[in-house]
Amino acid sequence: MTETTLQLDFDIDAARKEILDYCLRSMQYGLNFNTQGNISIRVPGVEDRFLITPTDLEYDKMSADDIVLVNGDSEVIDGRLGPSSEVTVHMAVYRRRPDVNAIVHSEPVFSNVWGVVGSPILGTLVNMVIYTKGDVPIMPFELSNNTEFGEHMCDAMGDLNAVVWANHGLLTVGPNLRDAFKTSVAVESAAKVQAYAGALTDTPIVLDYDTLGITESL
């Protein structure tokens, strides 16, 4: 690491280890498989620096040193591997959403079910609604390895904290990596409940974020 500014108030080694930990958790929770998915964070206190998982590397073969430091133009600042092929999507989010400091992209089964059906994941569970701030929209299918996709995705997500990519996967955001990951887990749980509830009713009970009056998880 040649950038001394990152060494002042930010432990980059600890941040890389945290990202790897959540990568491994995503496998344990069944959110990802093979080389799918990616995770990134905005480096706190340093302008235009982000850490992101590398491209085409299985999480269980990844080391903390493999996490790549990039700038807002998706250029590698530090790292021996290339960044995720969807790095420009992450950068679009960070440009559009100054409130976002972490991004988790995963490919969980039940979230993808609704992405294939083309129907939003409804606010059937209170924790999901609190984390996402509403129903999770479905973005129509596009190839995801370009900036235009990122812009269109941000349009679909708006100020929510989650969006499903049709025929592809789920993206969640948060003020920190823990919250972004918890949002992924909550969305997948709600997606599963909604799928099962559909066998019993066409009108499930749906919660509205604006009327809940709760902003923290229960």
Image (spheres, rainbow, N blue to C red):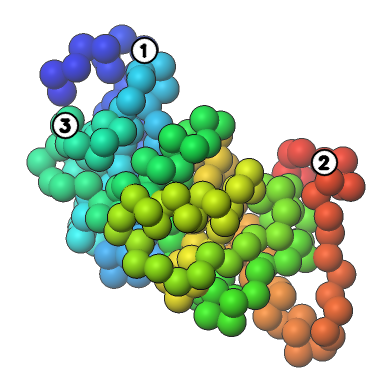
The CA distance from mark 3 to mark 1 is 18 Å
The numbered disc on residue 214 is: 2
Asked if marks 3 and 1 touch (Cβ < 8 Å), the reply is no
Vertical side of 5 occupied by 88: above or below: below
The answer to whether residue 120 is left or right of residue 87 is right
Q: Residue at x 71, y 48 (%)?
A: 133
Query: What residue is pinned by disc 1?
Result: 9
Q: Residue at x 54, y 74 (%)?
A: 115
**Callout 3: 10 Å neighbours few (<14), some, many (20+)?**
some
Inspect this view and state whether residue 64 appears.
no
Kindly state the secondary structure of the residue where label 3 is placed.
strand
The numbered disc on residue 78 is: 3
Could you tell me which quadrant the N terminus lies in?
top left
Query: Of discs 3 and 1, which sits in the foreground?
Result: 3
Amino acid type of disc 1? Asp
Kindly state the secondary structure of the residue where label 2 is placed.
loop
Q: Residue at x 77, y 81 (%)?
A: 197
